[in-house]
Amino acid sequence: MLQKIFATGALLCTSAMAFSQIAAVTPTIKPDEVTSTSTSSAPPPVEKKPLLAISGSVDAYYRYDFDKQPGNIRTSFTGTHNEFALGMASVKFEHTTGKVSAVLDLGFGQRAKDFAYTDDGITQAIKQLYVSYAAKDWLKFTAGTWATHVGYELLDPQANRNYSMSYMFTNGPFSHTGLKADITQGKHGVMVGISNPTDYRKPPSGFMNKKFFIAQYSYAASDKVKLYLNYVGGKNPDTSKGNQFDAVVTATINSKFGFGVNGTYSTVKPWDGVKNTDANNWYGAALYLNADPLPWFGLTLRSEYFSDKDGVKGIGSSLFANTLSANFKVDGFTLIPEFRIENAKDEIYLKSSGAPKKTAGSFILAAVYKF
């Protein structure tokens, strides 16, 4: 009998010790949450996200213009011929504490300078700098400067599959500085905000200082199909009035195929010294076809139509541009060979001899690394 009592006591002590060890490393659960699992195996610990996240990229490229005219193709960041060139070294810091988060996104190089063309000196290195407060799960306020919501393409080269940029990206907004609110309800999202004139971190002294209104409506039909309707408008420092309407659709067909569509329409009412005159306009549309037949290899064809017949953007014609880019990927590294051919309604390009022509083309080999 004593042996049975001692054996029972030892068993109870052992069970109590085991339970105390499990309780020390596992959260308290409600009785109705208990399942028939073995007490000898604790659940895996919850992975905590770091308070400070750091990411970034570096890129460089070589470009050859078939007519030896670096200015034939008038889009951002790649205005060279027969040159190796540095793109941008970028580093992004993201910190979150409770409901408050902050982002400092820095870029160094010609790409960053062109992006922050209204700034001088060290402030040209600031791509984004903002603070956000999540008042509710469905409501967030952001103040500072951030990349535009307009368009399909982004500044960072690792975020695009084509290395050269579209005409819509080049002529649309780059960034906004001000205050905005993001509201999300289920599949729907709305952003509204007030900002300085487009691309100005600080309004230029001696010019008109009016604020712009910015807005976006987004709808996620599913994880694979998303729609964005964008707007930006206001009175520019030169007293002209501008309005831009933009739409983006992204769709993933399967793991190997997807596409994107972007369309934009912009009007500008110049100032004649007395009043704003009738509006001039420019507009464009682009289709992006993405194929990834292999995990390490992808292709993207961008076909863009761009019209600036009123000369608002200095082109004075319409054109059709096709860009075919291959993506060879190894971990965070992507090698991008790219061919681009453009055809315009008028002779807006130059031959190597300087004679005008209606077509232009170029080749780019770009290397992009992200971390």
Image (cartoon, grey):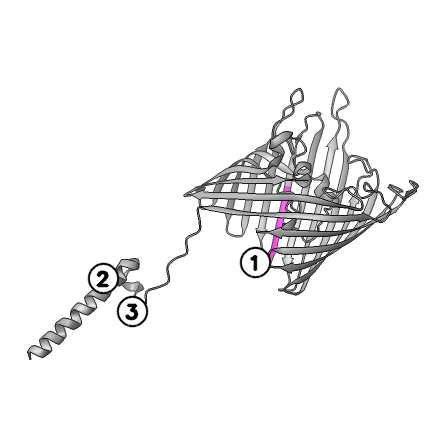
Residue 264 visible, this orientation: no
Span shown in magenta = 225-230
Disc nearer the start of the sequence (2/1)? 2
Of all residues, the one furthest to the front in this rendering is 84
- Where the N terminus falls, by quadrant? bottom left
Indicate the position of residue 81 as horizontal and vertical percent values: 80, 44
Q: Which quadrant of the structure image shows residue 346? A: top right
Return the mark for residue 40.
Answer: 3
For the residue carrying disc 2, how many other residues have a C-alpha within 10 Å: few (<14), some (14-19), or many (20+)? few
Dot 3 falls on a residue whose secondary structure is loop
- Cα distance in 3D space between marks 2 and 3: 12 Å
Dot 1 falls on a residue whose secondary structure is loop
Q: Say which residue label 1 marks.
A: 223
In front of the other: 138 or 67: 67
Indicate the position of residue 144 as horizontal and vertical percent values: 54, 34
Of all residues, the one furthest to the bottom in this rendering is 1
Disc nearer the start of the sequence (2/3)? 2
Magenta stretch, overall SS:
strand
Dot 2 falls on a residue whose secondary structure is helix
- What amino acid type is highlighted by mark number 2? Ser
In front of the other: 300 or 122: 122
Q: Nearer the viewer, mark 1 or mark 3?
A: 3
Q: Which quadrant of the structure image shows residue 310? A: top right
Compared to 243, does 247 lie above or below?
Answer: below
For the residue carrying disc 1, how many other residues have a C-alpha within 10 Å: few (<14), some (14-19), or many (20+)? few
Q: Say which residue label 2 marks.
A: 20
**Is residue 326 found inside the magenta-colored segment of the image?**
no
- What amino acid type is highlighted by mark number 3? Ser
At 64% from the left and 57% from the top, the residue drawn is 251
